[in-house]
Image (cartoon, helix red, strand yellow):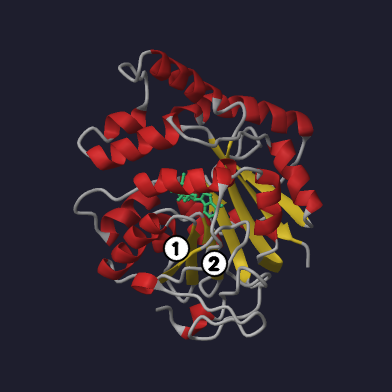
Amino acid sequence: MLPAEALELLACPRCTGPLSAGLSCAPCRRRYEAPDGIPDLRIASEGRTEAVRAFYTAAPFPGYPPHDSLWALRARAGRSDFARALDEAIPGDARVLELGCGTGQMSLFLASADRLVLGADLTRASLVLAVRHARSFQVNAHFVETDLRRPGVLPGAFDVVIASGVLHHTEDPRASFAAMARLVRPGGVVVLGLYHAFARLPHRLRRAIARATGYRFIPFDPVLRDRGAEPDRRAAWLRDQYQHVEEHRHTLSEVRGWFRENGVDYLRAFPSTLLDEEPPRGGALFTAAADDWPLENLLAQCRWAAALGREGGLFVTVGRRRA
Ligand SMILES: C[S@@+](CC[C@H](N)C(=O)[O-])C[C@H]1O[C@@H](n2cnc3c(N)ncnc32)[C@H](O)[C@@H]1O
């Protein structure tokens, strides 16, 4: 079961009332279970959400390499400019929520210092792997099963809310963002990673060729090549990137519209929309970009098709909820 400081951040997914230590909701009198120590605060899903849940239940994403260690996990994250910038920007005592945490790698990476990190996902099979690795790596991260559209966490309770590679797999990403934005406290930060409409094009071309050849020929996929010796993680990538049941793509201006609708001020994108900017260091990820010019933003997004196309075309938008 979760420690008291993490339990305090949970809520009834039906009425958003606070939960007792036994996972009972006083306002609506519902009681929830926590099989394997993972609170089940998911309202039964149906339709396309259930199809997505079944999809990830069959192949939890991204999965762990065999014989993984905390050292290796941190080394992998440390090679990512984005993961480093995120870690440097989050204060050491922040309450962090990762929505759609999958098998939990980012949550485990960020759970250092006095941070309280809660990973939430629709798919129990992924969370079981996350908890198993948190225990064996002795990392203090906590996990909960819940649907981000009806989340079992307290609104306005988190300093940072992250969802990377998740909302574009929900039926209505715009409505999903509205649900996400409610969870961050006024003055807190949202970090949203989505497939980009232009940067996804190279992958879609690759996917069309893969499908046309019955997956016998999949050209230029560096991730599949790197995972040649790891059949499970290779299969998870193949399913996630080539056979997904729900996928949307977005542009920066569309996401900025969602931010405006939900009282979130745009800070910056990652990669940067400035043509000559280095990756943000020392906390700069949570500060406003030096410039914000529509023409430069558009040019940068065209450039992302080449820069991000190799690995699926994910871009990140960062914003701060108005106080
Ligand atoms: C592509 S994986 C990304 C996992 C992780 N964020 C990462 O970047 O490695 C998408 C994850 O989103 C979760 N997900 C999809 N729809 C969700 C929803 N409505 N509520 C919570 N999680 C959801 C899936 O179960 C899956 O684990």
Q: Which residue is mark 1?
A: 110
Q: Position of residue 11 (x, y in %)?
A: 60, 74
Quarter of the N terminus within the rendering: bottom left
Q: Looking at the image, do the residues carrying marks 2 and 1 touch, with CB atoms under 8 Å apart?
A: yes
- Of the residues shown, which amino acid type is indicated by label 1? Leu
109 sits left or right of 249 in the view: left
Nearest the camera: 87 or 230? Answer: 230
- Counting labels gives 2
Residue 96 has which mark?
Answer: 2
What mark, if any, has residue 67 been given in the picture? none
Depicted 129 relative to depicted 76: above or below: below
Q: Residue at x 57, y 39 (%)?
A: 315
Quarter of the figure with residue 136: bottom left
Residue at (53% x, 75% y) in the render: 93
Instruction: Give how far across and how far down residue 99 sits, in percent.
Output: 54, 57
Where does residue 175 sit, x and y in percent of width and height?
70, 49
The amino acid beneath tag 2 is Val
**Is 193 left or right of 262, judged from the image as shown?**
left
Is the residue marked 2 within 8 Å of ligand 1, measured from its CB? no
Question: Crowdedness of circle 2 by 10 Å Cα count: few (<14), some, many (20+)?
Answer: many
The answer to whether residue 288 shows anywhere in this view is: no
Q: Residue at x 60, y 55 (%)?
A: 284
The residue closer to the viewer here, 296 or 1, is: 1
Q: Secondary structure at mark 2?
A: strand
Q: Secondary structure at mark 1?
A: helix
Q: Residue at left 56%, top 56%? A: 162
- Compared with 264, 297 (above or below) is above
- Of the image marks 2 and 1, the number of the one nearer the N terminus: 2
